[in-house]
């Protein structure tokens, strides 16, 4: 398989595997109101939009004679800035929710916990895959996807810990504050990654 096809298929697989997350978390929110779970829903929705954008732009720029090098560079730059913006948007909304949320009745967080745990595994694999593809043939979109999936894997690990505490010891001050702190930490990390991505693409 050519590197071009491998990159396209990896991006497509990323979109397909990420698509069910927001839907399942949205349904899970009907029975659970954890701040971390709500914030995770917002984050995954924003990241799904970023993945779709990256897949479309990567496919366009890899088509034979579809655009010259100048247009290709502009499209890749636009895609990566959009990914960074979605990371900042998701992180900002998560941080606000962590600050204003006061509902201690978190309900059922098992759907969110399950998705986060699976996310740790899947996102780590995608992080390694994108890193390898970019090392074999450097590409701006693949490099940013590697950064995005590194952030996603670390964020999902944080979300897993926070939701696990809510599931094991619900209604306690420990789980309540860890839930909020987990959400805030995730938010700040996403904002940092998104800001760094935007800054690098604008100044490159």
Image: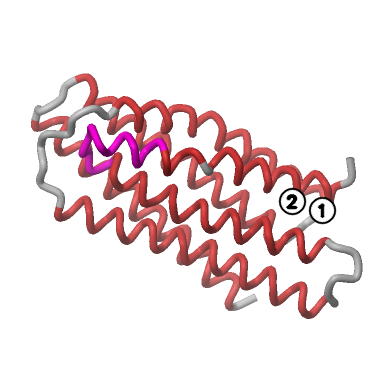
Name the residue rendered at 54%, 44% in the picture.
150
The residue range painted magenta reads 24-36
Return the residue at label 2: 134
Q: In terms of image quadrants, where is residue 126? A: top right
Q: Quadrant of the N terminus?
A: top right
Q: Residue 133: image x %, image y %? A: 76, 46
Q: In terms of image quadrants, where is residue 46? A: bottom left
Name the residue rendered at 61%, 57% in the picture.
144
Name the residue rendered at 17%, 54% in the picture.
99
- In the current view of this chain or complex, which residue is farthest to the top? 168
Query: Residue 31 lies in magenta, yes or no?
Result: yes
Q: Say which element carries label 2.
A: helix
Q: How many numbered marks appear?
A: 2
Question: Up-down: is 22 above or below 109?
Answer: below
Nearest the viewer among 26 and 114 is 26
Q: Horizontally, is 156 left or right of 146 in the view? A: left
Return the residue at label 1: 137
Q: Horizontally, is 117 left or right of 163 in the view? A: right
Task: Report if the CB atoms under discs 2 and 1 are less than 8 Å apart.
Answer: yes
């Amino acid at each position: 398989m050519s590197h071009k096809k491998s990159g396209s298929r990896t991006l497509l697989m990323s979109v397909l595997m990420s698509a069910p997350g927001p839907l399942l978390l949205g349904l899970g929110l009907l029975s659970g109101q954890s701040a971390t779970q709500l914030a995770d829903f917002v984050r995954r929705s924003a990241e799904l939009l970023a993945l779709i954008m990256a897949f479309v732009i990567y496919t366009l720029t890899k088509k034979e004679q579809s655009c010259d090098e100048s247009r290709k560079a502009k499209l890749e730059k636009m895609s990566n800035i959009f990914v960074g913006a979605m990371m900042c948007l998701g992180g900002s909304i998560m941080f606000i929710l962590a600050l204003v949320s006061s509902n201690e009745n978190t309900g059922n967080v098992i759907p969110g916990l399950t998705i986060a745990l699976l996310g740790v595994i899947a996102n780590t694999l995608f992080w390694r895959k994108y890193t390898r593809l970019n090392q074999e043939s450097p590409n701006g979109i693949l490099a940013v996807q590697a950064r995005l999936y590194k952030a996603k894997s670390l964020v999902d690990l944080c979300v897993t810990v926070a939701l696990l505490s809510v599931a094991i010891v619900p209604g306690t001050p420990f789980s309540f504050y860890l839930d909020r702190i987990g959400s805030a930490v995730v938010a700040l990390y996403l904002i940092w990654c998104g800001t760094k991505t935007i800054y690098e693409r604008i100044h490159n």
